[in-house]
Amino acid sequence: MSNFSFKGGLVLENPFPAKEIDLIRIPLPDRVILPMQQRIGEQAKPCVSVGDHVLTGQVIATIDDDRCAPVHASISGTVVAIDNQIMAHQSGIKALCVTIESDGEDEWMDNSVACTENYDFCTPDTIYNKIRASGIVGMGGAGFPTHTKVRFAEGCHTLIVNATECEPGIMCDDALMQAYPTKVIRGVEVLLHICGAERAIIAIEDDKKESIELLRKFCKNERITIESIPTKYTSGAEKILVKLLLGIEIPSGGYASDVGVLCQNVGTLVAIFDAVVENRPLISRVVTVTGSAVKEPKNFQVRLGASYDYVLGFADIDHGENNFRMAGMMMGVDLEGSNYSISKNTNCIFVNKVEEKTPAQECIRCGMCNTVCPVELLPQQLYWYSKSSNIEKALDYNLMDCIECGCCSYVCPSNIPLVDYFQFAKALNRQQAREKEQTDNARERFEFRELRLERNKKERGEMMEAKKKSLKEKMAKDKAQKEAIAAAQERVAAAKAARESENAG
Amino acid sequence: MQAKVMSTNQVMRHVIYALILGVGAQVYFFGLSVLVQITLAVITALAAEALVLRMRGMQIAPSLSDGSAALTAILLAIAVPSIAPWWIIVLGVLFAIVFGKQLFGGLGNNPFNPAMLGYAFLLISYPLQMTQWPSEFQGVLSIFELSGIDVLTGATNLDYAKTQLMLGESIGALTFESVSQMWINLGFLLGGVYLLLRRIIFWHIPLSLIIGLVLMSGILYFIDPDNFSSPVFHLINGATMLAAFFIATDPVSASTTPLGRLIYGFAIGVIIIVIRVFGGYPDAVAFAVLLMNITVPLIDYYTQPKVFGK
């Protein structure tokens, strides 16, 4: 049943197909740079100091925020620096990193607790904590902590394993499935055990024949089905994938967990297997190196924190003037140079020959963009309002539902970088919302202060009134008392006088 | 949907290619003057565009090479009678490019179809020159007012039909107009099919325009066949096919949502008939398109497709 389809999207071939999809293990790097800041949430706090000796798999930073995961040393050696380094981000922003210099031993920390092979006997909570302690995040590129995503999806009915390889050109999932088909299946079983879903669907694009065959061969579990879906871009987007496989539309602004579905990337499942069964925290990942300047695209199993240059050294690259891009050709980010390190969500590095860019022309509203938009927006209208910073109108045209897949930019005959405009508009919207919140807060504070002053004044008035009243009462009482005393004195005096006159008489 | 088909410049170029058949038919029936009009129009358009861009302090070459000014000029030249004096087309194109397009900010920013704005300007200002079509094959002399004798001119078929029907007389057999109009419309129809196949235009506007036109004229014809022309007559006369495939489909000034395009095209079809039948002008494409251009922002806003998850 391979008639899964969805509106919009693009049929894109891999621009740089590889002859063979092998998983190549490269030697340990001499040094690794591990970032503390993750995709969202707070920065992890280093729990090692410069000069400390660390073992592979040892926790070097912890965090309480459930939107991030702890960080582990990916090689054994000495911590040589804890300082700010440039992140692989368009802005070239710097963030705190721990740098470890290898001792060449790759001596592992003994992490064996509980579980191992017989995870069936572990409670879901034990495994959950194991995943959490192993620093596992979504390996598809989003980098959201897996334990939190699993917790959100509590009570879900279906586990969807995203093995679609989100963008053309990236091959890391394919390489991983071909190298470790059993790990994938076992990883699914572990996750099924803890998330409570009745069934799991592994969705693979139909151009990955070997992976489909291998997984079908090794899958003996009746609760797991392997579906071959059409190779059409954005099928890997969570919302689209859920609709594609189950016919369920995730409500606008919602998540898969809202409709009882847990989506996990296939790389994440292998990481879960490694963590739960083999007691290995997340310290490596598969990275695809491809692009027009790469002679033969390759997939490397790389320790986290290895530098791009170190990894690229194992690929056959034309040493001309090259552009670097992290993640896919559609949604990735262009980078200045290659002075970065592999992080948990670095799924692909594109090295492209420098090409002259065709300048953007005016939008002629041809409407190609709305035919390819997988969430059925009108990008030409959004562009018009984003460009003029008319955020209110852009929101009317559902700006916030844009998944930034880049299909519209890709087909635009005028070469307009539409998604860049939408990202800008979204950022502007967030800023305006924040400013509005601040002014609202300020106004509220001001109004409350006014209210308080008013109330104080009123209360003081009431107090004065009460005081006056009580004073008056007291005076009245005093007067009455005085009068009573005077009357008594008079009576005494009268009695005394009467007695004296009696005596005299 | 497949990967990128063509660039904006290529889109414009292919629309111009698609006009070849219809223009060929015009040349066959009306003479080489048609080509002279087109040449004059294109030269004027490029010069006007270059001048305004220079005054706006913008780069000239990229805009001129996108082909949009040339396309506007060609469309207007096709719509203007081939024997009209040379200054008619020059004035019309100047108005279309300067007032219809550049003053709004150039390509992509014009709310009105520039060619139709130019046409409406000419029709209102020079009604005599704008309604005289040749009644037989003509040379190019009349354009430059060099011809010693008056050229043979006549009203268009639409005009003729209106007058005849009003007078209570029947429309004659296949006249020169009928044959020429039919072939010219066929030429533009084929060009339109080419655009559809190349996925340069979407089917919504041409189809709904034709449906609107046939429905409206069909209702009138059904009520009173003696006083109204048949839908077939309206389909093969005047600028119907040119409007359906080349004028109303101008993406910049047309509605851009799928449902919006259907409404937009349908309304243009209906208005064309209303003006042709009840209005004072022989043809109605320009006014119908301009009228609907105004409504586009409203149509687009209320016909947004259902967004995923809403």
Image (cartoon, coloured by chain):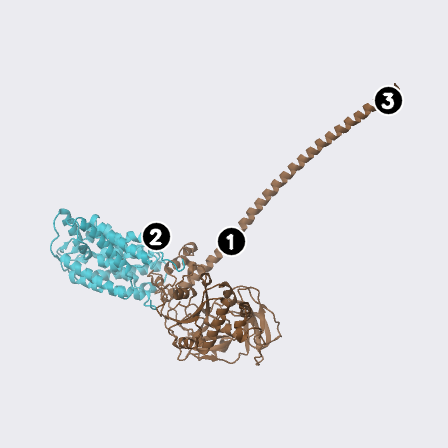
The reply, left or right, for residue B239 in relation to residue A480 is left
Asked which quadrant contains residue A365, the reply is bottom left
Q: Chain A is drawn in which colour?
A: brown
Q: Position of residue A441 (x, y in %)?
A: 54, 51
- Amino acid type, mark 1: Glu
Which residue is under mark 2?
B298
Q: Where is residue A262 in the image (x, y as percent from the top left)?
A: 46, 66
Q: Mark 2 lies on which chain?
A: B
**Nearest the camera: B160 or A229?**
A229
Q: Distance between the residues labelled 1 and 3?
A: 91 Å
**Nearest the camera: A245 or A471?**
A245
- Quadrant location, the N terminus of chain A: bottom left
Residue at 29%, 55% (x, y): give it. B264
The residue positioned farthest toward the right in the image shown: A504
Q: Helix, strand, or loop for circle 2? A: helix
Q: Where is residue B104 in the image (x, y as percent from the top left)?
A: 34, 55
- Amino acid type, mark 3: Glu
Q: In this view, does A195 lie above or below A449?
A: below
